[in-house]
Image: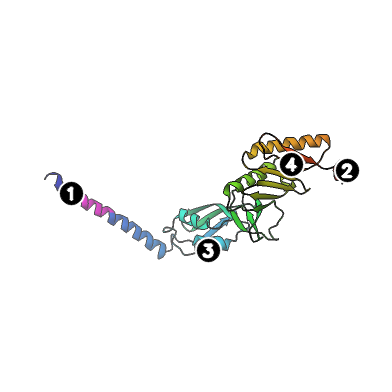
Amino acid sequence: MEENKGFPYRRFVIILSLLAVLTVLGVASYASLRLGIFTVEEIEISGNNRISEREIIKRSGLHRGLSSIFFFENQVEEDILGNPWIRTVSVNKEFPKKVRIEIEEEEVYCIVISGGGKPFYISRSGNMLGSGNFDMGLDFPVLIGEVIENPDLLKEALDILELSKSSIVLNWNDISEVHIDPIYGIKVFTNDNRRIEFDRNKIVEKWDKIEKILKHSDSLGLKEYYINISSENMGVVNFQPPSASSGAKDG
């Protein structure tokens, strides 16, 4: 019985605490909505180049006169990230009247040709960004095949493009198309009409083999038109005839 005597008191304290919280929220709400102390008057956006400020503000749900107390930064960030061109976003309240939105946009990594033949931009992580167009440029390596349906194949194709960025014998700018097939794997076509078959798996090891083949061929003054390194133990190389090879060099 003695233990129960304290129960009404504890309940009374809890009720008083809740009333205090509600009072604070009520005062804050009144100050925000009636007096305009904590209402949004300025929204500053930085880091956006491709995406308009209007698009960002529309997705954020923010507007002038909105109470800065009754929205949460993480929810606003999640809403803004709904645009595929946005890689990261940071939303910060700067009381009493300012909200700062910092954007990091995705970069076009390559182009994917869909089943209908329409080009789409894709990011390094494999996210579809939007339709290709002349205004933003179309001079990127092109991925062709069942790309979206095969995420593992897509990753391997993107890894090949990433390896080419630091290569002196088969550079990013040398690659025209990357064909992706669930049965035959990955084939790379270059701007000077070379065809390189990677197949699947162990892409880094196969890339090292490609670089060795190309460096050795160059040291001999030879030009390849077909390389197959689908086997882990050996590679097949077909060279252009000497006249064609020298003609290509002279050109």
Q: Main secondary structure of the magenta part?
A: helix
Residue 115 relative to residue 71: left or right: right
Instruction: Find disc 4 in the rendering and name its residue.
Output: 227
- The Cα–Cα distance between marks 1 and 2, rounded to whole angstroms, is 100 Å
Specify whether residue 36 is painted magenta: no
**N-term mark: 4 or 2:** 4
In terms of secondary structure, where does tag 3 sit?
helix
Kind of residue indicated by mark 4: Ile
- The Cα–Cα distance between marks 1 and 4, rounded to whole angstroms, is 83 Å
Residue shown at the point (58%, 61%) measured from the top left: 53
The colour scheme used here is: rainbow
**N-term mark: 3 or 2:** 3
Instruction: Find disc 1 in the rendering and name its residue.
Output: 7
**N-term mark: 1 or 4:** 1
Kind of residue indicated by mark 3: Lys
Instruction: Find disc 3 in the rendering and name its residue.
Output: 58
| Mark number, residue 243 | 2
